[in-house]
Amino acid sequence: MLDTKRYKSAGYVASLVLILISIVITLVVLGNRQLILDNVSAWQYQPTDEIAGFVDRTGMSDDGKFLFYASHPSLEGTQAFNDKCARHEKSTAILGCYDSSRIYIYDVPNPKLDGIREVTAAHEMLHAAYLRMGDAERKTVNALVEAEYAKLSNDSNFSERMAFYARTEPGERDNELHSIIGTEVNVISSALEAHYTKYFTDRSKVVTLHTQYASIFAELQLRSEELSTQLTALSASIQKNTANYNKEVGQLNQDIASFNARANSSGFSSQAEFNSERTRLVSRAAALEDMRAGISSEREAYNRLREELVIIASESEALNQSIDSSLAPAPSL
């Protein structure tokens, strides 16, 4: 005869165990919801050879690669990129965005800017990493990136860049610093470097890529400033020397007219006096001719520098246009 009481008790225990297991599973799922979603998303993503190349060229680790692929990164042309990534200020181009757990990268067409897409990819991947940090880790990382920013605050370009983020993405300062420092700053604290090893096996790769294309802009800017300074100095010198030359020419013409009048009216007491004054006038005329030649040389130099500045301005404009997604080409028929 079956012991129904014992059977019911065993069934109750089994049901209770199942309930407890269900609760544990639910808690585990809830506690790891983002990780589960990331795994599913990464598993579903099939990178192109070009996107896969970004991982290698930037030195991403397996964790960095995982977050990158879980964000379904895509290269976008002008119009598609503009549709996906909001432009906050017309005067500032953007190269990528992390929006709705997706990474979009502007497909910069200029081969001179090799590496700019890769650095953008790594930058956006670090945004994905930052958003997945727990409160304690984020607090630690925020302190580390703020310490690095304190070292960079004297860099006017960097400060202006952070001011842009403050205007367009208020409250995201440390998030942006985390991505910028991680992909662009070579020497950082050992503690912060240790943090980035989660996402890069060799962070110097992505920093080197950034340095290479950033140096193109920096060199053009530096040369442009040098030329502007030289042109300003030359212009001032030409104006000053031209004024002096014209003044001296006017005075010499008066003195030559006076000399000729005296010569025609026997105004010299001797041939020696005549020859002496004539020699001085000839010497002054020769000196003025040298001054005129010097001014002509300065003008030629000014024109050469101005032509170089025009070329540099054109190169800079072409580079800036190539990273500006708002300058979409006209649709073809």
Image (cartoon, rainbow, N blue to C red):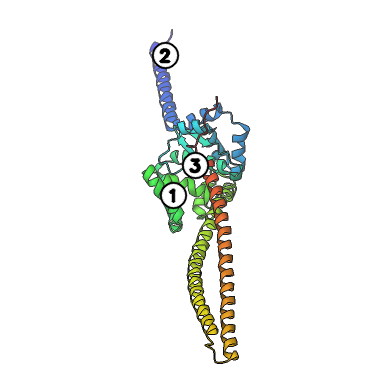
Q: CA distance from mark 2 to mark 1?
A: 72 Å
> Which-is-in-front pick, marks 2 and 1?
1
Q: Which mark is residue 7?
A: 2
Q: CA distance from mark 1 to mark 3?
A: 18 Å
Amino acid type indicated by mark 2 = Tyr
- Residue wearing tag 3: 126
Q: Nearer the viewer, residue 122 or 26?
A: 122
Horizontal and vertical percent position of residue 40 = 52, 27
Q: Nearer the viewer, residue 70 or 303?
A: 303
Dot 2: element: helix
**For the point 44% across and 56% down, which residue is it?**
156
Q: Which mark is residue 2?
A: none
**Disc 1 crowd, CA 10 A, few/some/many (<14, 14-19, 20+):** few
Q: Which mark is residue 161?
A: 1
Amino acid type indicated by mark 1 = Arg
Q: CA distance from mark 3 to mark 2?
A: 57 Å
Considering only vertical position in the picture, is 228 above or below 57?
A: below
Classify the position of the C terminus by image quarter: top right
**For the point 44% across and 26% down, which residue is it?**
25
